[in-house]
Every structure is written in structure tokens, then in C-alpha cells.
Image: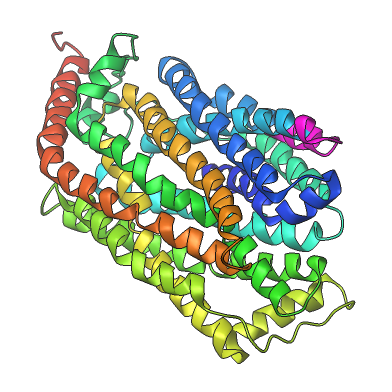
Amino acid sequence: MFVLLASLDNAAIALYPALTKVMAADLAVSESRMGLVTALVILASALTAVVWGYFGDRSSRKPLLFWGTLVWCLGLVLVTRSRSLAELAGWSALVGVGLGGIASVGFSMISDFVAPRRRGLAMSFWGLSQGAGGFFGILLGGVLGAEEWRTPFIGLAAAGGVTALLYLTTADAPRGRAEPQLAEALAAGGSYGYRIEKSDLALLLRIRTNRWLILQGLTGQLAYGSLIWVPLLYQGKVQAAGYGLATATAVGAVFGAVFQIGGVISILAGHLGDRFQRRTPRARAIISMVGILGAVPFFIAFFFVPLHGLDIPVGEGGMAIVLATLASVFTNPYAAAAFLLSLAALAFTSADSPNWYALLTDVNLPEHRGTAFGLGNLSNGVSRTAGNGLTVVAAGLLTSSFAAPWNYAIGLTVFQLFFIPTGLCYWMASKTCPSDIARVRSLLDERGREALPGGQP
């Protein structure tokens, strides 16, 4: 259920860039202004994740996840009633508020289901589900929304509502359940009763690894945030090949979805993080650093691959377009090259997500993890919002010198350079995390002894 929830909320975000051209045309606004609406969803999610995470660390988390899901579902329904950019922005902000709860509270809960030795692998599935959601959202939006953009918003809201009801049937993990240091006490009937206090907020920022993990988001998410416009880049390439807007929207969405397949390698990256973390506590941070830096040249090459010789049927329905686009990955050398480059780029960046999640869990106590994630997500979200919004602005400014779609290719390239300082942040985190992990384990060991029957505080 966590995987499904995370998948659907990322699908909701992905609808916006996939449908930017169509929505902008329907509401008679520029693409850059529509791009700011997408950025607003991400920003609202980031700002509210800290609040959701804090209350999740103080109380029962299951109701928060349920109501958070209903909030973003309601927001999607209201989005379809928008007749102006202002209305669209207001209801989209509501979508972001609900999504913020799924991010931080969901992270806290999943960390209590999985022991540290398998945490990277588990987090890879959680992170992969978010990539799968983006895949689904782009595909759903581009194919079903090419003619009427409101249809996929209604369909996704319905799917989210059903999932929220199904979530009520799931178990609620006790806080600290997966920590080895607490296992004996919990098995003997003890409990872990610690909850976050307001005074703990300053403590979270004093943890050196937390600071580096938060700081890396300020640069890294500028690059990640720009990548949400890859479907728009490929829509422009398809239009440059002579196809109309509706066809280009569908084809660009299929390409954008297919190009995310490389993210599945995050499962291997999470497993490697678990394996090498048992040898050195620096492993997760170093693997993330190598992945981030290794992806840059592949992304840049991917942006500039042209699309010549496309053979897409027009007027034969959405499924015919999907099948022809998928076939081009095997029959068209340009599409094949783009696919292989995206596969390599995402294979490298897939190392980042599961190891960031697992490392953030390792250096924070169970009652702090939702809030710690919220702070990291705030940094990530603000930066991702900037990358998301500024990419469209930069592409617009470049239009005077570079015709579409190459204005987007150049703009995206510039933002990938922010991965370089991100790698440096991970290198610094690799130096501080051993002592921070040791501190958490020592404190949990002490609390585990206290929680045993007859234990002394």
C-alpha cells in the first residue's frame, strides 16, 4: 500500500508537465505561466511536508496518511473545474498540501517496517514506486489528455480515493519496531514511547549528516526539477518533425515515460548500499555521490539527440500512437540512442534516492524521522520548484537565439551542472555519518535496555 500510495501521488505531479501545452492552449495562457503552476504544486508539497511529518512523529500516522490522500484527490477533482489560471493555481496548491503528507508521514512509517540491514532495498522499492508513478502520470496524461486534459485528473482522483479506503485495512507499525536494539524489549512486551518535542527541532539541525543531506537537495533538486520537462522537450522534437500538437503531446508523453525505465536499477543500488554499508558506514553516501556525478554526461547527450525519421500514425487513435512510438525505440536509430542514453543516466541517478532515504533513517531516531524527512523534503522541494520553474523561463529566454526544441535542450543542460556540488555534499556526508550512526545505535541500545521488564530509566 505504501508503494501504491507513493506511486499515485507522483502520478498526480506528473500530469502537469505532460499536459502543459494542452492546458496552456485551453486556458489561453503561456507555457511558462503553466510551468509555474507545476512548480506551485511541488512547493506546496515541500512546505507542508514538515508540518505533516512533525504531527506524524507525535501521533498516530495512519489517519494522517488517509486524510492526506483524500485532500490531494479532492484537489485533483477541483482542478478539473478550473476555468482560469488563478483557479487552477489555487486548486493545484491544495493538491500539493495533500501530497506533502504522503511524503513525510509515509517515509516515517516505512522506516519502522524494515530493519537497517535491508533498509536501502526497501527504500529502493518506495523510491521506484515514485518513478513508476511519474511514468504512469506522464503516460496517462499524454494519451488520455491529449484531446481533453481534464479526463486523466478525474481518473487519477478516483484511483486515489479507492487506495485511501484500501489503506484503512493495513497494519500500523509500532514506532521503532524494526530497530535491532529494541527487538528484545518489544518482544518481551515493552514499548517505545518516545515522541518528538519542539525542542528536538534544533537538535535535528545540529546533526552534521542531516545538514549535508539537506544541503545536497538545494543543488541536486535544481537538476532533478528541470527533468520534469523532458516530455515537453520531446514534444517539441516531434513538432519539429512536422506533427501537430495533439500527436506531439501523446508521443512526447510516451517517450517521457519510456525514458524513465532506467530508474528500476534503483533496486540494485539499494541492495548495494545495504551490502557495502555493513563494511563501512560511509558506503551509502559514497554510492550516491558516484551515481550523481556519473549521470551528468549521459543526460547532456540525451537532451541533444535529434528525432529524425519518425513514422507516427495520425488520426488512428491513441493506442496506435503508443504502439508506433514504442516500436520506434527499436526501429529508429535516433529514438534507440535516446533510450540507451536515458537508461544510463537514470541508472546512475537511481543510486541516489534509496541511499539518501536509508542514510537519513540511519542517522535519526524513530521519533524524529518524519520531521527530518520533512526538512530534507523542504530543501528538496524549494530547489525542485526553482529548477522546475526556471527551466521553462530559461528556455523562453533562449528562444530568441535557439529555436524550439533546442532552447529546452540547452536549458536542461545548464541545470544538470548543479549535480556537481551535490556530489561534494555527499562526500562530506560520508565523513560525518559514521559517528552520527553510532550515536543513534548507542542511544537506541540504552533505550532498549530501559524498555525491558524491570529495566531502569
Is residue 74 within the magenta segment?
A: yes
Residue 217 appears left or right of 398: left
- For the question of whether residue 423 can be seen, the reply is yes
Q: Which residue is painted at 52% across and 46% down in the image?
A: 390
Query: Which of the two residues, 354 or 193, is positioned nearer the viewer here?
Result: 354
Is residue 216 within the magenta segment?
A: no
Query: Which of the two residues, 415 or 261, is positioned nearer the viewer here?
Result: 415
**Highlighted magenta segment, given as a residue range:** 72-87
Residue 317, percent across and down? 87, 73
Residue 191 appears left or right of 24: left
- Furthest residue to the right? 315
Q: Which residue is painted at 46% across and 68% down in the image?
A: 262
Colour approach in the figure: rainbow
Q: Quadrant of the C terminus?
A: top left
Query: Which of the two residues, 385 or 316, is positioned nearer the viewer here?
Result: 385
Residue 137, percent across and down? 66, 54
Q: Which residue is painted at 39% across and 71% down in the image?
A: 298
State whether residue 233 is above or below residue 35: below
- Which image quadrant is residue 330 in? bottom right
Q: What secondary structure is the magenta-colored segment mainly?
A: helix
- Which image quadrant is residue 18 in? bottom right
State whether residue 274 is above or below residue 326: above
Count of numbered badges drawn on the protein: 0
Q: Quadrant of the N terminus?
A: top right
Residue 140, percent across and down? 72, 58
- Furthest residue to the front? 400
State whether residue 67 is above or below residue 384: above
- For the question of whether residue 357 can be seen, the reply is no
State whether residue 287 is above or below residue 52: below
Residue 326, percent across and down? 66, 79
